[in-house]
Image (tube, rainbow, N blue to C red):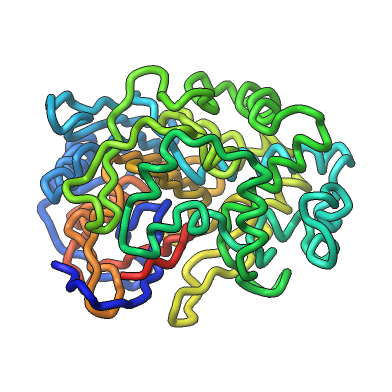
Amino acid sequence: MVVKTGVRRRMTVGVLTAACCIMLPGVAVAQAAPAQTAVTAQGVLDREVLRGSLDAMVEAGMYGVYSAVRDGREEWKGASGVADVRTRRPVQPHMRHRVGSITKTFTAVAVLKLVEQGKIELDAPIGRYLPELVPGERGQRVTVRMLLNHTSGIADYILPAYPSFLEDSPRSLDENRFRTFSPRELIRLGLEAPPTTEPGEKFAYSNTNYIILGELLHKVTRVKAEDYITRHVIRPAGLRHTYFPRTPFIQGPHSKAYEGLYGLIDPPKDYSVYTPTIFGPAGALISTMEDLNRFYRLLLGGKLLRPAELAEMKTTVPVYNENGQVVMNYGLGLYNLDLGCGAFWGHDGGVWGMGTQALSTEDGSRQLAMGFNLMKYQQIDENGQLITHPIDYAMGAHMVIAACSVPEGVTTLRSPERAWVPPMIDRISIKR
């Protein structure tokens, strides 16, 4: 679709999160030959079908995608497509990947470790710890818990940091590509913007919350947040390929990262290299799909937090869509989503050109981690709503095949009227 010039409308879209489709309870399925079954009755992963579902994403327009799936002791890793559209270098399952807001789960775990030690109180006002950063009445009303579950009402800093998005221009993305943002600057941008809600009123996603939490970690431990998370979360979890980048570059084998910004960048441009300070403890981590599965398995299995703190992490608030329907439940850096075959815990992430999804059953027996290298490829209709792309349907099919034990003879249906686009929790408004 071509967006007409001169027409101004507001659209709520996820600039930092991938849009994808998955099947939910009550969604119809289509009959297929037994050879197309994703999982046998015993739960053995069908590698051929899993690989075929990745290929379908590429056939629908995705440049490259890699995925790691676990079912008990069964593991599968696969990849399809290219890491570089010019050279046609193929993607590989083990590639390093910017995982975006999945970083928030790591940051939340670090905070909860300090709760365990009695150094932070979840329901204490943030002004007790950071009176100079969150001063006055807001500092006394917003609690640590509200920052963790996005009920603080503090606005996101992304739009103030990239003002050209309000002008239908990606200019700010290039202007700020190698700019170093300080945490205090990002917090100031978020606090100066109009509040999204009253403190504690309801869920309203904001990266500013987790930049503040990073400064809380720094204040309490006297160690930079990224270093504290590395020492007390990443290393104890035995994650060999997960790290906070200190330069604009991704170390190790990786894909390029193509950003389309909903048609504002055409053709999509590689943004795999940029200064990561814009995201920090809210979204700067680099990891692999295998590492993400290990992390969530250990976390949900009680290996990283005590039972009391893990229970706090899984205490959720509802997340509503524009129609007032609950689409997920958000805890402390962790959300709960029903895929139709049961509840899955995890988080999604998206930065310039790279999107990620990591989901796990509560017992860690079934897991999916998926990364892809083309973001915001959809177009926008005359009402300012995203037009679901064929990639979304193919992505949803892979997620269901990977996450759910599909009965023999049944496969997922990609028909638009039978697919559901999951909520995007990273949201900003763009004038189009």
Residue occupying the point 24% across, 68% down: 380
Total numbered circles: 0
Give percent across and percent down for residue 62.
19, 45
Please identify the quadrant where the C terminus is shown: bottom left
Residue occupying the point 30% across, 73% down: 385
Q: Nearer the viewer, residue 13 or 293?
A: 13
Q: Is residue 119 above or below residue 273?
A: below
Quadrant assignment, res 353: top left
Give percent across and percent down for residue 368.
39, 42
Give percent across and percent down for residue 108.
66, 44
- Left of 164 or right of it: where is 49? left
Please identify the quadrant where the N terminus is shown: bottom left
Residue occupying the point 68% across, 40% down: 109
Q: Is residue 335 above or below residue 322?
A: above
Q: Nearer the viewer, residue 353 or 430?
A: 430
Q: Is residue 205 above or below residue 47?
A: below
Q: Is residue 40 visible?
A: no
Q: Is residue 207 visible?
A: yes
Q: Nearer the viewer, residue 177 or 81?
A: 177
Residue occupying the point 35% across, 41% down: 354
Quadrant assignment, res 148: bottom right
Q: Is residue 338 above or below residue 9?
A: above
- Left of 57 or right of it: where is 270? right
- Left of 303 or right of it: where is 45? left
Give percent across and percent down for residue 191.
67, 60
Q: Nearer the viewer, residue 147 or 211?
A: 211
